[in-house]
Amino acid sequence: MPADRLWIRSPLAILSPSDRSAAGGLVIEGGRIVELLDAGQAPAQPCDASFDAREHVVLPGLINTHHHFYQTLTRAWAPVVNQPLFPWLKTLYPVWARLTPDMLHLASQVALAELLLSGCTTAADHHYLFPDGLEAAIDIQVEAVRGLGMRAMLTRGSMSLGQREGGLPPQHTVQDGETILEDSRRLIVRYHERGEGARIQIALAPCSPFSVTREIMQASAGLAEREDVRLHTHLAETLDEEAFCLERFGLRTVDYLDSVGWLGPRTWLAHGIHFNAEEIARLGAAGTGVCHCPSSNMRLASGICPTVELEAAGAPVGLGVDGSASNDASNMVLEAKQALYLQRLRYGAEAITPERALGWATTGSARLLGRDDIGEIAVGKQADLALFRLDGLRFSGSHDPLSALLLCGADRADRVMVGGQWRVIDGQPEGLDLDALIARHRAAAKALLG
């Protein structure tokens, strides 16, 4: 059982609000942060236990706002290694359509465990494949999240526009609108938690303009408003997508988003690369958020998200690892490093600091998910923390601990806490046999491609 009051003492460094150094550490009670301490300051009340963090950099738990867990089964697959998005998808759709419930559970466990070990405590997943036999895909993911003790925003994705109607997906991978909406309603009623400390939340996520009909976009927006849940989709990832929207709808991507009732603060978008200045201004005015996926965008040569302009316009910006067939990893601290470097190519070193990149992975990502109780080390917030040691060879000679996390390439947390409970201790996830999981996952990946 966790201690009633835990003092995490004297961290090597801590990413805390700018008006507080918190050099003396923080106190946790009831799964929340109840005190931040200055150097030399003791807790106001006695603590049941303490953890000496003098060798740890302490971050808020990182928050991943876009993923496709199932894709861990198709990492680094030779036929798609050198393909851009559209041919990459067309090659992989038939493979993914062979997913089974056991395969999805294993893939989700691997994605979540990898995220957790990288310091991630909350993950959003975008699952849009429901072939025969996999109708309970989101239920399977809920089980996997609960098993790892994490938080998740699981988005009920959908594809309803098959190749026969001019879409990209094969016909056998699409569903009709009523099936999609009925299952969406079921999942919201069964799983969606509200308020502070929520562990499982549901959002609605028609996949992309080239894989869903206008009707399902509009119906999903209406259902999300009635049920007060969030909306998520891919948008403006590639110029091919822009051309598709112009040809099919006679609209650019943001115009299309507006036309189906999605331009608003309930929505967050994956990628958000190919926007012009007027579209960025509209996204900001609407409060529509964008998840930057730097590794995937580089891997598929899609482009660079205009993060600085989006933030300046008022659009929240967060980070996501994207699926493990276009990243091909699920590591949030490495994703923050990629964001730092890719965005410096666009905006320069002075504008994109390690603190800004870490902010996208924490407070920015929390805003995308509509959460104000996570993503920050502050009194009253959930005790979701990631602790990193800097004692490896790669850190030898480093001086600024927070900068060293990204510049020297931290890739694994030493300890991770979710809601006041340790989920990773000494670099190992609690209650999970990693060797056994890897063996089963490798066998499933081989069977899927066999």
Image (cartoon, rainbow, N blue to C red):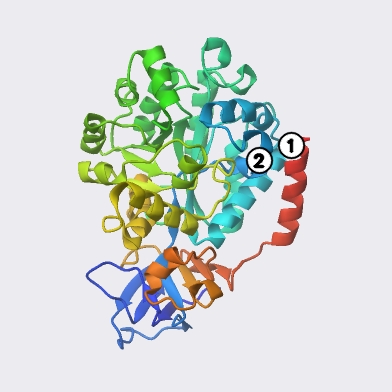
* Mark 1 or mark 2, whichever is nearer to me: 2
When the figure is inspected, residue 172 is found, relative to residue 13, above or below; the finding is above
When the figure is inspected, residue 285 is found, relative to residue 409, above or below; the finding is above
Return the x and y of residue 189 as percentages of the image width and height: 48, 37
Q: Residues within 10 Å of mark 2 (few under 14, many from 20)?
A: many
Residue lying at 45% horizontally and 78% vertically, measured from the top left = 397
Q: Quickly name the residue at label 1.
A: 448
Please give left or right for residue 413 compared with residue 316 in the image: right
Return the x and y of residue 85 as percentages of the image width and height: 52, 31
Question: Which element carries disc 2, helix, strand or loop?
Answer: helix
When the figure is inspected, residue 339 is found, relative to residue 399, above or below; the finding is above
Task: For the C terminus, give its image quadrant.
Answer: top right
For the residues labelled 1 and 2, the Cα–Cα distance comes to 8 Å
Quarter location, residue 130: top right
Please give left or right for residue 215 compared with residue 255 in the image: right
Disc 2 marks which amino acid? Thr
Return the x and y of residue 132 as percentages of the image width and height: 68, 26
Please give left or right for residue 322 compared with residue 255 in the image: right
Question: Which element carries disc 1, helix, strand or loop?
Answer: helix
Q: Is residue 384 visible?
A: no
**Farthest top residue in view:** 164
Q: Nearer the viewer, residue 404 or 26?
A: 404
| Mark with earlier residue (1, 2) | 2
Quarter location, residue 17: bottom left
Disc 1 marks which amino acid? Leu
Residue lying at 34% horizontally and 82% vertically, measured from the top left = 24
Quarter location, residue 361: bottom left
Q: Disc 1 vs disc 2: Cβ atoms closer than 8 Å? A: yes
Q: Quickly name the residue at label 2.
A: 74
Return the x and y of residue 292 as percentages of the image width and height: 40, 44
Q: Is residue 125 visible?
A: yes
